[in-house]
Image (tube, rainbow, N blue to C red):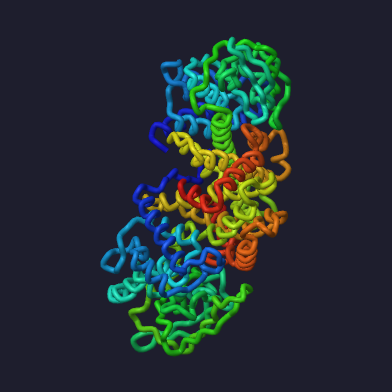
Amino acid sequence: MSETSAIVAETAARIFEDLADPQTVNQAKDEAWQAPLWASLEESGLTLAWVPDTLGGAGASLADGFEVVKVAGRFAATVPLAETLLAGWLLSEAGLSSPTGTMTVAPSRWADELKIDAAGVITGKARNVPFGRSAEHIAVLADGPSGPVVALVKLSDVRAGDGRNLAGDSSAELSFDKVRAVAHAPAPAGLDRKCLMLLGATVRANQMAGALETVLAITTRYSGERVAFEKPISKFQAVQHNLARLAGETAAAVAAAGSAADTFANGITDDRLFLEAAGAKIRVSEAATEGASIGHQVHGAIGFTKEHILHRFTLRLWSWRDDFGNESDWAVRLGRMIAAKGADDLWPLVASR
Amino acid sequence: MTAAIQFDQLRLPPECEKLRAEVRAFIAEEIEGGSIKPSGATGGDSFSREFSRKVGAKGWLGMTWPKKYGGHERTFLERYVVTEELRVANAPTRLHFVADRQSGPILIKYAPEHIKMKVLPAICRGECCFAIGMSEPNSGSDLFAARTKATKTDGGWLINGTKIWTSNAHQADYMIGLFRTSQPTKENRRHGLTQFLVDMKTKGITCNPVYQITGHHDFNEVVFDNAFVSEDHVLGEIDGAWKQATSELAYERSGPERFLETYYVLEELVRVLGPDPDVRGAEGLGRLVAQLHTLRRMSVSVAGMLHAGKEPVLEAAIVKDVGTIWEQRLPHKARELAAFSEPEATNQIPFEKKLAYATTIAPKLTIQGGTTEVLRGIIARGLGLR
């Protein structure tokens, strides 16, 4: 990690520690804690980290932004920080300015169909849009008459369903019934659905890696506190081996997500990026499945309750597997790419990273 | 909530990629010449004096060692590239692999100068095979239960007892053995073992073959009957081997050989599935490639951290734990994914041959060089649980 990335990550961590401590948030009666958290993130320039200063953002590097989303994952805080980063990036790529406030992005699924006409009127549906009901704006990558177009839309102009993910965060079906964009511009060459999905997958993978780090930390700590059969359960070999497996899965997630982020940050755009980003979403999602279940097993009944913070991480880990392509979907795509290239090209591709 | 696990994002530097091209060119020549057989499965486990000598002549053995011992003073990352390329090509590296990876570094650290001057250049030339004398009939993972004795005599030591599951012993020039020189103390059960360099031609050493489930002879029972080892062949502190055993382990645990041992199955699977696999085949393949890519990134990252002078002990143990389980499951996973492939697919026969071999060697992968159970204990210690 570069020195600037470390400083940015530290700034983000301090804000989350102060304003989104998982214990405090878990006990909160309402969502009043979200406004001061967002205000503080916005004030520090973190929400528009990926927007150049000429377009109203903080102009941070891709690497810095990935560190921020990983920190956000460590706190599993329910604000659309990762989504706003992505939306800001998408708008900036098309030369559009970003508004302040919360944003989300669509599509986050391969199958969604969104069309935009020459006048900037959007029709179509996007499913499972994270924070689709609660964010203020949405950045949309839609199919235009002559190629992909980036558009900024006010979410109050869009009909939103009330779907939620396992953790209760908005994951809405959005219906665009001839919605007029606030602003729109053609996407630059190379910015297509695949590109957005790859970046979205890498962002989610880094959030998930952060969440797994916390699951490992709190599970390890709990095993040292909980006494059974007259000793801390961390002293039982069976528990130790479960925690070692959790560490292995967390390590794989951290390595895969970090590697994909580093690939994006270095501007690599060919098959290597596909291997890295798809590989990260696949491996991190597998780690989420395995890691969350070990976290619960070690915590026993207390981890299965609302009052304990574990669910803040595990429920999101399970849900985030599905955003920007789930692991099965990416695996089919990656497998097809490898098969089409052929056996002799497999190792050279793996070794190129 | 700070992150305990660290993977620096190292990419191999340009000199490594230049070297990789040289290694690939060499491998292509050797395939042409017949010393590497891409259609076989057992290549990586084969012993070839001729091939090892060629690798030595290329300057790819003792790569990181001082020049005065025949080494090449290159980086650990360059060694990494040579190791992974030869491993993936399933090249016959058995003769030199152990000597190059772990015996040489132990000698550099603990052997007297005149022995280093004699043995290390031979390793670098690819002429010297080493065995590791650790396991005994009643001492496996529990190394400190070793009972084979070294008793002080005039000018050296007399070895008596039995080592077992000793790979290469029947072909090895030397063994680095762990022998009991004192009884353990009440305070420290690890006390009392000493490392020795043993010339395998020494009178009083008998090697009896132990055949493996593959049908191959790799294991041996090595019986010591008053075998004499001279004083200058003691490696390090008498009774204090336990202090020496762990220092090089991060290198041994995190290398590419810890997840690539059955790689040839994956490559054949791609051929069996063909250029346009069904959804099931594609998904299975995609997952395997994502897992492999992740393991390699973890392993390269650990190599980079070691290169930078860090001590990623926890991360290295994790690479071996996750990596060996992956390479062990790979043949079984490949078998499932190939279940519906048509037998007339061009490479069905090599696939089946390689699959059969990988399936039979798979059980050893999570046992050799530290079992899964031992590794998880080490990881647990790294997490602060022990």
Above or below, B201 against A282 in this view is below
Please tell me which residue lies in front, B107 or A40: B107
**Residue, far left:** B68
Instruction: Give the number of callouts.
Output: 0
State the residue at coordinates (61%, 14%). Answer: A117
B302 horizontally vs B66: left or right: right
| Residue A238 in the image, given as x and y percentages of width and height | 66, 56
Above or below, B313 against A123 in this view is below
- Asked whether the viewer can see residue A107, the reply is yes
B231 horizontally vs B216: left or right: left
B302 horizontally vs A302: left or right: left
State the residue at coordinates (54%, 54%). Answer: B379
* Quadrant showing the C terminus of chain B: bottom right
| Residue B269 in the image, given as x and y percentages of width and height | 62, 55
Q: Quadrant of residue B344?
A: bottom right
Please tell me which residue lies in front, B324 or B239: B324
Please tell me which residue lies in front, B338 or A71: B338
| Residue A154 in the image, given as x and y percentages of width and height | 61, 13
Please tell me which residue lies in front, A268 or A13: A268
